[in-house]
């Protein structure tokens, strides 16, 4: 049976096989995102007679506003009833379908541009889609998808960051009210999205589950690389939650300005005509090597006695000593960004 649509697609008598009509969709979904609704539906690949779709002319989206408290919103209503009461809110010609295409799906946003703000959260909205051919014919409406919009908080306006040696710590203020001004704020948690290109937005957040506090510590990062962060609010009164739009982008390029930890157990042992310096390495994983300085005890003027960084051992032999001389040694660790640890000193007297 073909669907009769006043002012749109028309009813037709039984058609010969050569009339090609796209099959009605059966996978329409609708979900709230921020303060609008996102529809997803697959584009039919076959006609009602099993042939490949070649005559699709346009896609029509129809919407029916209903009482949000009614039990009927959970059920499919008769197609003729929906057709009679619903409004056609969007018609997409086939030439523009690519603008809405994501793989095999059309993704369409209903921003309620013609609806008063006060009505948005007081009604339920039932949607169905028509695929109309070049003879103004359709096989019928898709399945119906219903959404009852809920006012949730807006995304945070400000995001702050603190870079530490082992994390990028991001925080933001918790919302105090919902986007319609109602209180308390309906917050189930937060999502945070990270990318390495300013224009790219990942499909999945970096947090494996909703963040219950307005903060996130990113420990999977590299210094000197730029990251872009965006935060959304997960709102609503029950699961599944409703995700807000994304906050403004926070750009972060972490720099390593953190000195490594000093070496441990620095000791000097004299052996005949030389002094053997021994130490345990710095616990910091990014230390490249060590520098050793020396001076005579009680005198000024430290002198570095190692040229290149000591990288292959945790010891150094100093042969420039005088029998009976008293010396002070100092050692520092140097990391991959040139940061230096505090110096560790040791004293010893040559025999």
Image: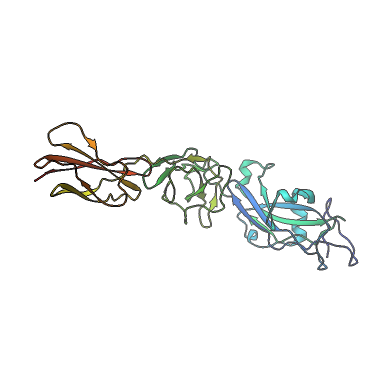
Q: Quadrant of residue 106?
A: bottom right
Left or right, 235 with reference to 124: left
Total number of numbered discs in the rendering: 0
Residue 335 versus residue 246: which sits nearer the camera? Answer: 335
Judge whether residue 57 can be spotted in this image: yes
Percent across and percent down for residue 169 are: 40, 44
Residue 55 versus residue 280: which sits nearer the camera? Answer: 280
Residue drawn at 91 percent across, 66 percent down: 16
Judge whether residue 148 can be spotted in this image: no
Q: Quadrant of residue 35?
A: top right
Residue 296 versus residue 324: which sits nearer the camera? Answer: 324
Left or right, 188 with reference to 259: right
Residue 263 versus residue 18: which sits nearer the camera? Answer: 263
Quarter of the N terminus within the rendering: bottom right
Percent across and percent down for residue 92 are: 76, 49
Percent across and percent down for residue 121 are: 60, 47
Percent across and percent down for residue 63 are: 71, 52
Residue that sits furthest to the top in the current view: 300
Residue drawn at 66 percent across, 44 percent down: 112
Residue drawn at 39 percent across, 47 percent down: 167
Q: Which color scheme did the rendering employ for the protein?
A: rainbow
Left or right, 113 with reference to 244: right
């Amino acid at each position: 049976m073909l669907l009769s649509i006043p002012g749109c697609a028309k009813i037709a008598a039984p058609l010969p096989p050569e009339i090609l009509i796209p099959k009605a969709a059966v996978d329409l979904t609708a979900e709230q995102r921020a303060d609008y609704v996102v529809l997803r539906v697959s584009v039919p690949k076959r006609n009602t007679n099993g042939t490949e779709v070649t005559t699709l002319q346009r896609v029509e989206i129809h919407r029916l506003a209903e009482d949000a408290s009614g039990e009927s919103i959970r059920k499919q209503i008769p197609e003729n009833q929906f057709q009679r009461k619903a409004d056609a809110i969007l018609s997409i010609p086939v030439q523009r379908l690519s603008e809405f295409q994501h793989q095999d799906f059309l993704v369409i946003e209903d921003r309620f541009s013609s609806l008063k703000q006060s009505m948005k959260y007081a009604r339920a909205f039932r949607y169905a889609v028509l695929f109309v051919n070049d003879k103004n014919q359709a096989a019928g409406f898709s399945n119906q998808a219903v959404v009852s919009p809920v006012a949730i908080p807006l995304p945070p306006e400000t995001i702050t960051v603190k870079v530490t040696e082992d994390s990028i710590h991001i925080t933001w203020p918790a919302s105090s009210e919902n986007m319609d001004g109602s209180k308390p704020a309906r917050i189930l948690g937060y999502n945070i999205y990270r990318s390495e290109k300013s224009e790219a937005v990942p499909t999945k957040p970096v947090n494996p589950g909703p963040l219950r506090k307005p903060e996130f510590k990113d420990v999977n990062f590299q210094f000197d690389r730029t990251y872009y962060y965006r935060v959304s609010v997960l709102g609503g009164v029950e699961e599944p939650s409703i995700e807000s739009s994304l906050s403004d982008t926070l750009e972060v390029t972490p720099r390593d300005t953190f000195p490594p930890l000093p070496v441990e157990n620095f000791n000097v042992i004299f052996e005949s005509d030389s002094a053997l310096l021994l130490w345990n390495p710095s616990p910091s994983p990014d230390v490249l090597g060590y520098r050793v300085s020396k001076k005579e005890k009680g005198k000024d003027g430290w002198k570095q006695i190692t040229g290149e960084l000591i990288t292959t051992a945790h010891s150094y032999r100093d042969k420039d000593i005088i029998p009976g001389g008293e010396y002070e040694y100092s050692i520092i660790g140097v990391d991959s960004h040139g940061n230096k640890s505090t110096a560790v000193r040791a004293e010893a007297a040559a025999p």
